[in-house]
Image (cartoon, helix red, strand yellow):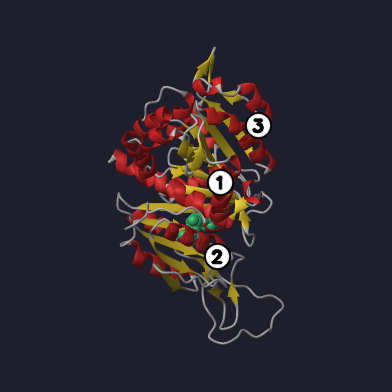
Amino acid sequence: MSSLKNKKILLGITGSIAAYKTAFLTRILIKAGAEVKVIMTEAATHFITPLTLATLSKSDVFEEVSSGSNWNNHVELGLWADAMIIAPLTATSMAKMANAICDNMVVAVYLSARCPVFFAPAMDLDMWAHPANQTNLQKLLSYGNRLIPVGHGELASGLSGAGRMAEPEDIVAQLSQYFERTDVVGESSTFLEGKRVLITAGPTYEAIDPVRFIGNRSSGKMGVALAEAALRHGAEVCLILGPSRLSPKYENLELVRVESAQEMYEAAVQHFHESDIAILAAAVADYRPKDVADEKIKKKSENLILELVKNPDIAAELGRVKRPEQLTIGFALETQNEEANAQAKLAKKNFDLIVLNSLKNEGAGFNHDTNQISIIGKDNKKQDFELKSKKSVAFDIIQAIIELSKKKKVDE
Ligand code: CTP
């Protein structure tokens, strides 16, 4: 159950006698450390009171899209959640969800939610078996919603058969299993099927002589996590990796090992023309020694002066040559004026999105397993994320890229 700790759960309740069980459901979720916000249809309030659920969830209960002069923001609620569970789900509400009939707060939030949606139907056996309900069920599943199967047994009507809402413990176990899986490997989908994603990652080493180099502390972890997340969403990935200890091996992953910024530049330019998306996550050295000594430099004088020359800017070059349908995503690691500097980089390098991580945030940046980011778009809109594992951050970044490509498709 620890996978539910700090998870934000929306509980949508519709008007069935099984609604009384949502008091237990809320209690178990809260006990497992989740944050719960409850949304009810008017019909649901006849079976269990909002006061009971507000007390158990320690939060206001939402019933109306607007109440008095307040507008309850269904979009905000939809964006807030890590998962939504609609339990019990009646035949009427299932039909509304299947057909976007948005006449109550539960359906409004459901239609706005970006998170996975689970639903636990509750019906009498003949209602549940009716082809109209089975058709709506198939529709909900085809939209990617997740069914928590109905149970068999005695029903409120006195009849016995399939149609009972799953028990609260079973619903929580399924949610918990879902988070256990996604916390480790992330969400998977086919959104990037047929797309080629190019990723630069890791540090670069700039040779001084045959044994020495100028390098940086990048581990390559963020780039490898991005490659894994893109693969999980069905992409083919070309990972151009500087000298990192990591050596990922996956189906559909082409790993190109490079050492210097110049080598990374050449590999990136070569692979970019066949890529749909490029994510520039490498910590590329801005300068390299002008001359590389053929032999190990001997210790002679008190001071040694190295002349450095500028390396090519990979991101700027890809931004310059990119075709309208290609997307480039950059990173900005800043220590001051973070947002303004990131926005300037986004414009200068012609990125579609820039991921900002501030070294001021504890646990973020090089060599940590965690990272805290904001994602800024061309419209300068900023989305802030919490401190998370790099794996989880990678999924947020890939999700933002998927949203952007969907939007681009609609605009075209
Ligand atoms: N980048 C790149 N090639 C370079 C330098 C940077 O592809 N030669 C990419 C990085 O991978 C990152 C973005 O550009 O996605 C911004 O990198 P950063 O080092 O923050 O920017 P710089 O342009 O080097 O600016 P500065 O060091 O002055 O902050």
Residue 356 visible: yes
Q: Quick one: label 2, few (<14), some, or many (20+) residues within 10 Å?
A: many
Q: Kindly report the distance in space between the C-alpha atoms of the residues bearing marks 2 and 1.
A: 32 Å
Amino acid type of the residue tagged 2 in the rendering:
Gly
Q: Is residue 238 left or right of residue 303?
A: left
- Residue name at image x 59 percent, y 29 percent: 20
Q: Is residue 234 left or right of residue 244?
A: left
Classify mark 1: helix, strand or loop. Answer: helix
Amino acid type of the residue tagged 1 in the rendering:
Leu
**Mark 1 highlights which residue?**
175
Q: For this rendering, which residue is in front, 52 or 334?
A: 52
Amino acid type of the residue tagged 3 in the rendering:
Ser
- Residue name at image x 44 percent, y 61 percent: 199
Q: For this rendering, which residue is in front, 227 or 251?
A: 251
Of callouts 1 and 3, the N-terminal one = 3
Identify whether 13 is placed above or below 81.
above
Q: Kindly report the distance in space between the C-alpha atoms of the residues bearing marks 3 and 2.
A: 41 Å
Pointer 1 and pointer 3: residues touching (CB < 8 Å)?
A: no
**Mark 3 highlights which residue?**
57
Most distant residue in the right direction? 302
**Mark 2 highlights which residue?**
220
Classify mark 2: helix, strand or loop. Answer: loop
Residue 107 appears at what percent x and percent y? 44, 29
- Residue name at image x 59 percent, y 44 percent: 172
Instruction: Tell me which corner region of the image, top left, top right, bottom left or bottom right, holds residue 53.
Output: top right
